[in-house]
Image (cartoon, helix red, strand yellow):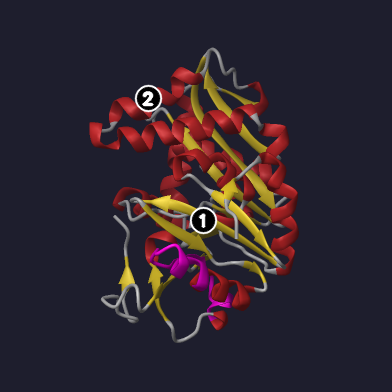
């Protein structure tokens, strides 16, 4: 098994294997994998009828559940990691994959990695008492600012990138590495919109970008990879969300707004939009490598 860096040309290969092993969470969306490939040092390998992916987090390899012949792929991973003297942790496991994980592993539900799935129709109308506060913010933005909405293709990489620096200025120094990784991922997305099949919107007030959202379609779902706003504009967050839902509702029934990473404010915000369901994410720990892991644990990543 020979791992190599993920390339743009691997998109077709991944999509072909996803047809053999359907995946619904954002982790197997090629654009997500590609845009964060440098930050996580994402690699890919092909052996027989199985596709393997891995990344590095906290100086340790994490292996995605294999695509194709999954059970056989897990055996290959055990053999491979024994030869490499690595511990084996398999990530991005959905509920339908649990049947392929046997008693050699402890299986943990990682709540912070669950994907939030919303009705595109519901977010495009914001009807009902549950959305009253959201409607008020949207209406406030509409009445408070002169604004225009542009396709993401009109984002100017030379003139508008300073908008992305707002997030970095508002966060402490210890988040600097994460900010730079996300900024680079967004930059790569904007450079490769067509190649990655990305779509999105820009919200502007005057000449200033005050909101940006972009993602990709996966079947009848739109996966939102990035959503950034200038919070000095009251209601900008609710407005960009509302605009994007209206933009995609005729092409997608569902919107996947990805995970919350255990960030309290982000979780509160995502729950406030009333997800229709969650795609649970599990991690399998090889017991001989992780004897301390309890099979009944539910872990929130901080």
Q: Is residue 266 left or right of residue 156?
A: left
Q: Residue at x 39, y 64 (%)?
A: 85
For label 1, the crowd category at 10 Å Cα-Cα, with few meaning under 14, some 14 to 19 and many 20 or more, is many
Quadrant position of residue 25: bottom right
Magenta residues (range): 79-98
In the structure shown, which secondary structural element does the residue marked by tag 1 occupy? strand
Is residue 91 rendered magenta in the image?
yes
The correct choice, above or below, for 58 with respect to 163 in the image is below
Furthest residue to the front?
A: 83
Q: Is residue 290 left or right of residue 127?
A: left
Q: Is residue 79 left or right of residue 10?
A: left
In the structure shown, which secondary structural element does the residue marked by tag 2 occupy? helix
Mark nearest the camera among 2 and 1 is 1
Residue 119 at least partly seen: no
Residue 256 at least partly seen: yes
Furthest residue to the bottom?
A: 103
* Along the viewing direction, whichever of 242 and 154 lies nearer the viewer: 154
Quadrant position of residue 105: bottom left
Q: Residue at x 55, y 39 (%)?
A: 35
| Residue 46 drawn at (x, y percent) | 66, 59
Residue under pointer 1: 54
Q: Residue at x 74, y 64 (%)?
A: 19
| Residue 268 drawn at (x, y percent) | 35, 54
Mark 2 or mark 1: whose residue is earlier in sequence:
1
Quote the CA–CA distance across marks 2 and 1. 32 Å
- Quarter of the image containing the N terminus? bottom right
**Numbered circles on residues, count:** 2
For label 2, the crowd category at 10 Å Cα-Cα, with few meaning under 14, some 14 to 19 and many 20 or more, is some
| Residue 127 drawn at (x, y percent) | 54, 53
| Residue 42 drawn at (x, y percent) | 52, 48
* Along the viewing direction, whichever of 230 and 141 lies nearer the viewer: 230
Residue under pointer 2: 166
């Amino acid at each position: 098994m020979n791992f190599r860096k993920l390339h743009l040309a691997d998109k077709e290969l991944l999509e072909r294997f996803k047809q053999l092993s359907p995946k619904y969470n954002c982790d197997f969306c090629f654009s997500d994998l590609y845009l964060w490939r440098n930050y996580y040092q994402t690699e890919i390998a092909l052996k027989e009828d199985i596709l393997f992916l891995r990344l590095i987090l906290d100086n340790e390899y994490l292996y995605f559940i294999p695509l194709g012949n999954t059970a056989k792929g897990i055996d290959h991973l055990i053999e491979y990691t024994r030869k490499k003297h690595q511990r084996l942790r398999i990530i991005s496991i959905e509920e339908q994959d649990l049947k392929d994980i046997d008693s050699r592993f402890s299986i943990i539900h990682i709540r912070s990695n669950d994907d939030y799935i919303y009705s595109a129709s519901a977010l495009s109308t914001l009807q009902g008492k549950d959305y009253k506060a959201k409607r008020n913010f949207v209406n406030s933005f509409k009445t408070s600012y002169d604004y225009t909405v542009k396709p993401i293709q009109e984002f100017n990489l030379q003139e508008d990138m300073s908008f992305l620096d707002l997030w970095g200025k508002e966060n402490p120094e210890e988040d600097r590495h994460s900010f730079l990784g996300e900024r680079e991922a967004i930059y790569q997305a904007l450079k490769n919109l067509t190649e990655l099949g990305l779509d999105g919107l820009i919200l502007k007030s005057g000449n200033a970008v005050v909101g940006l959202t972009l993602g990709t379609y996966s079947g009848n779902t739109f996966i939102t990879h990035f959503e950034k706003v200038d919070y000095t504009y009251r209601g900008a967050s609710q407005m960009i969300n509302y605009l994007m839902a209206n933009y995609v509702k005729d092409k997608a029934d569902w919107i996947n707004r990805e995970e919350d990473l255990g960030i309290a404010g982000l979780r509160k915000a995502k729950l406030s939009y009333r997800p229709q369901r969650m795609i649970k994410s599990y991690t399998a720990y090889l017991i001989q490598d992780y004897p301390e892991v309890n099979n009944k644990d539910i872990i929130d990543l901080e």
